Structure formats: C-alpha cells, structure tokens
Image (cartoon, grey):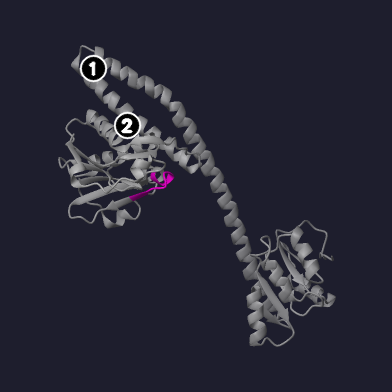
Amino acid sequence: MMVEFASADARPEVSLLVVDDIEQNRIAMRALLERPGLRVLTATGGIDALEVLLENEVALALVDVQMPGMDGFELAELMRGAERTRAIPIIFVTAAPIDARRSFRGYEAGAVDFLNKPIDPKVLQGKVDVFVELYEQRRQLHRRLIELEHALSLNEMMVAVLTHDLRTPLSAIGFTAELLLRTAPDDSVRQSAVRLKSSASRMAALITQLLDFSRIRAGALRLDARPVDVGELVEGVVGELLQATPDAGIELRVVGDARATLDPDRVSQVVSNLVSNALRHGNPGSGVRVVVDGGRSDSLRVEVENAGRIDPLERTRLFEPFRTRSGREGLGLGLYIVDQFVRAHRGSVFVDADRPGRVVFGFSLPRGELHPAVVEQAPVDDDSEQGAAI
C-alpha cells in the first residue's frame, strides 16, 4: 500500500481519496485539490485503495477506470458491497470515450459522475466542493442526532426518577385528605379536603402516565399476562370511575365469552383512559356506552362510544405523545399510552368518528393461550348477550 500526504501538518477535517496507477496523475490531483481543511489520500490501485479505506473516512473517491489488475469498476463494486464504504460517492476518471455501455456499467457499479481526461480544474474543484459540503452537512447532522438522543435519554431518566420519587409525598397528601374527610367537623375543611384529594388523584394519574411514557421510550415495558375475564375487568374499571363521578351515565354491555390471556393492569389502564376521555370530551349529559365483544374465538373487541365529534385534522395525530387540544388539561399522553399498551399485546386500536354525532374509540386483542373450550366455541347469538346500565 502507498498512501501519500502533502505535508506533515495536523490531520485535516475532511479527506478525499484519489485512486490512479500513474504517479503524475496523483500528484496533479493532490496539487489541484489539497487545501487547509481538506487533505488528499492517494492509492496506486484497487487493493491499495481498500486498505486506505479501512483506516480512513473519506468524503469522496476519485477513481481512475483503467488500472492494471483491479479496474475502477471492480473497485466500485467492492466498495458498494461493504457496509463501511457503501455510502462513499465515487467519481470515475477516464481518458477513454464514455459510451452508453461503459456509462451504464459505471453507474451500475455505484458511480455518481464521470470526468474525462484531460480534466478541467474548475469543473473538478466545483464537483469536489459540492460533495465535501454534503459530507460535512451529513456529519454535522449525525453529531446533532447523537446529542439529541443523549439529551432525550437523560430527560427520560430524570422523568422516571422524579416521578418515582414524587409518589411517596403524594401518597401522604392523599392519605391526609382522606383523614380530613372522615374526621373534620367543619364543612369548609371537608370541602377543602375533597379538592385536595381530587388534585392528588389527578397528579397521581399524571405521574403514572409519565412513568409509562418513560418505560415505553426506554423499551422497558413488561407485561404480566394471565387468564382474565375482560368483562369483569371492564366492569371493575367502570365501577371505580362511577365512584369518582356518580352522575356519569355509563352503559356496559358484555357479549359472548370475554376470557383472554393478558396483563390485567395494562388493559384496565387502557379502558380507564378511553372511558375517561369519553366522559371528559363527549357532549355533556349524553353518557358513554361500553361494549365488550367476545363473539370471536381468536380475539376480543372493546368499544367506547360517546356523543361528540373529532376534527378531521386531529384524527391523524390522535395517538402521538404530548398532543393536547386547546383548553384541555393533561399531558396528552393518554391515547399514546393506550396505543402502546395495545400494541404490546399484539392488538390494534381503532377510531370511528364518521357516525353522525358519535365517536367510537376501541381496541382488539388476541385471546392468547386460552382454554380449548374457548377456541372451539360456536358463534354467540343474541340470547347470550348480557346488558346492564351501570
């Protein structure tokens, strides 16, 4: 291998590679191109060039087509076949006429351009400047991406630590509010305790969302799957919501066999988020209808329907994190977490907002490892339906 440098100065930021078996051509190229901030590496042939590329990162390769042993086309094909050198732009330099056949072979081998000898210095410098600038832009973007990923990782770690540490004092606040509700003789104190308890509950929900978000982004979300009756699970969630808002009209209907193997805590959170959203964003006083459909042998479907509408522009970004509508409180993580939890169960989330005056959010989950009787179950008819206004 022969690598030539113009001087013994400090290594420049950007390197070019010139591959030519004629020494005078290499010297001429180096004289034309080398300048502060740009150095020219040279190689006498294909094998030398591959060795140079193993040790150096280059922005552009100027490759002579006609060389003894390995010609320029063969070198380009080898470069395209290696991960390290695949993205390096290649300009072929040739003294022979560029006919259609040679041009096709050159571009097929990975060339971005051809230059004919004798080379016009201005054309050469202009082309090199373009590729050097593109290389520097890519490298700068790569550095910024690494910095952003590092900052995001630190932020997510801080969120996880802070939200975890906040739970202890928040539990004390909630316990104190509950104690005041039970023991305070003064109505004004009890009203303050109610507001304190409500605020603590909202804060606890926000903390849970932030923790879930950090786990999802860190790839640390784990499922504890076990056999569950989803109908009973949803009934428990609805009951808890009604304790907080006794006047909310929630109708629950369970159809068919609702057994499945899943993580009950995660699915409970999915249902709670969807029903809470329906109560919060639906038309006041219209109520919410929840359906657990176990009529299929391989999957379960849960639908949450309320009166209202969704702007068509909002639909495409409903499940993105930190998306909040104007005037609405919260972090905008609820639907994102719903989507991620359902995906973790190998299920899917859907939205139907095309019914006049009605909006339906729902999800479908595979049943998982169930008792054989569930798999062999016949289709459920209308007589097996249980309906209840809760």
Report the disc number at residue 133: none
* Left or right: 307 in relation to 203: left
**Residue on which the image places disc 1:** 189
Q: Is residue 112 visible?
A: no
* Left or right: 32 in relation to 110: right
* Left or right: 335 in relation to 68: left
Which numbered disc flags the more N-terminal residue, 1 or 2? 1
* Vertical comparison of 21 with 37: above or below: below
Q: Is residue 157 magenta?
A: no
Please give the range of residues in magenta: 342-349
Q: Quadrant of the N terminus?
A: bottom right
Residue shown at the point (38%, 39%) measured from the top left: 371
Residue 317 x %, y %: 35, 53
* Vertical comparison of 371 with 199: above or below: below
**Residue on which the image places disc 2:** 202
For the residue pair 26 and 208, the one nearer the viewer reads as 208
What type is the residue that disc 2 sits on?
Arg
* Label 1 to label 2: alpha-carbon separation: 20 Å
- Which image quadrant is residue 45 in? bottom right
